[in-house]
Image (spheres, grey):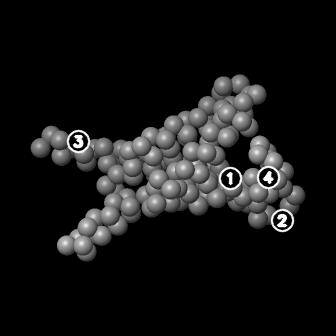
């Protein structure tokens, strides 16, 4: 009985982590970048790989808006986490590398949360889990 409770708490913890990281990234960072990308003004954005300001911003918007929504839903979770992890590692270790630790800390915290979810998976309270169990029932 105790192990069953443990799994429930683990899955609840994964849900809370997914919702918090996905929704805070979406609303605190992604929506603002979305507005910059589609706002019609001049785009000035860090371009660490030399692909152009607009392309770099579009990649960040894809990760911080689309992938964050997928993460919150628990849909295609590991696929969605990959661009988020890359975006946060670029932000922390390339874009903010000359800055003090306190500036890069937020990107690192998001990155570690994303890596944790990548390793654990989305948990039982996710669309991925629902689809996986539904497919298992259909195969029977």
Evaluate whether residue 23 shows in this view. Answer: no
Q: Which mark is residue 6?
A: 3
Sequence-wise, the earlier of marks 4 and 1 is 4
Judged left or right of residue 100, residue 54 is right
Q: Which of marks 4 and 3 is in front?
A: 4
Q: Nearer the viewer, mark 1 or mark 2?
A: 1
Q: Is residue 121 above or below residue 69?
A: above
Sequence-wise, the earlier of marks 4 and 3 is 3
Separation (CA) of disc 4 from disc 3: 46 Å
Q: Which of marks 4 and 2 is in front?
A: 4
Residue 121, given in percent of the width and then of the height, sits at 39, 49
All told, the count of numbered labels is 4
Sequence-wise, the earlier of marks 3 and 2 is 3
Task: Return the residue found at the far top.
Answer: 100
Identify the secondary structure beneath mark 1.
helix
Identify the secondary structure beneath mark 2.
loop
Q: Residue 60 carries which label?
A: 1
Task: Return the residue found at the far left.
Answer: 1
Q: Quadrant of the C terminus?
A: bottom left
Badges 4 and 3: C-beta atoms under 8 Å apart? no
Judged left or right of residue 51, residue 132 is left
The residue identified by callout 2 is 40
Identify the secondary structure beneath mark 3.
helix
22 or 80, nearer to the observer: 80
Sequence-wise, the earlier of marks 1 and 3 is 3
Separation (CA) of disc 1 from disc 3: 36 Å
Evaluate whether residue 70 shows in this view. Answer: yes
**Residue for point 59% across, 51% down:** 83
Separation (CA) of disc 1 from disc 2: 17 Å
The residue identified by callout 4 is 51
């Amino acid at each position: 009985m105790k192990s069953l409770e443990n799994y429930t708490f683990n899955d609840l913890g994964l849900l809370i982590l997914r919702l918090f990281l996905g929704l805070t990234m979406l609303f605190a960072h992604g929506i603002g970048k979305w507005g910059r990308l589609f706002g019609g003004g001049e785009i000035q954005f860090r371009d660490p790989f030399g692909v152009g300001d607009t392309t770099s911003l579009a990649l960040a918007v894809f990760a911080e808006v689309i992938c964050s929504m997928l993460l919150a839903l628990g849909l295609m979770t590991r696929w969605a986490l990959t661009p988020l992890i890359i975006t946060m590692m670029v932000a922390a270790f390339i874009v903010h590398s000359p800055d003090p630790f306190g500036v890069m800390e937020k990107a690192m915290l998001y990155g570690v949360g994303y890596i944790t979810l990548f390793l654990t998976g989305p948990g039982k309270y996710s669309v991925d889990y629902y689809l996986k169990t539904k497919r298992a029932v259909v195969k029977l």
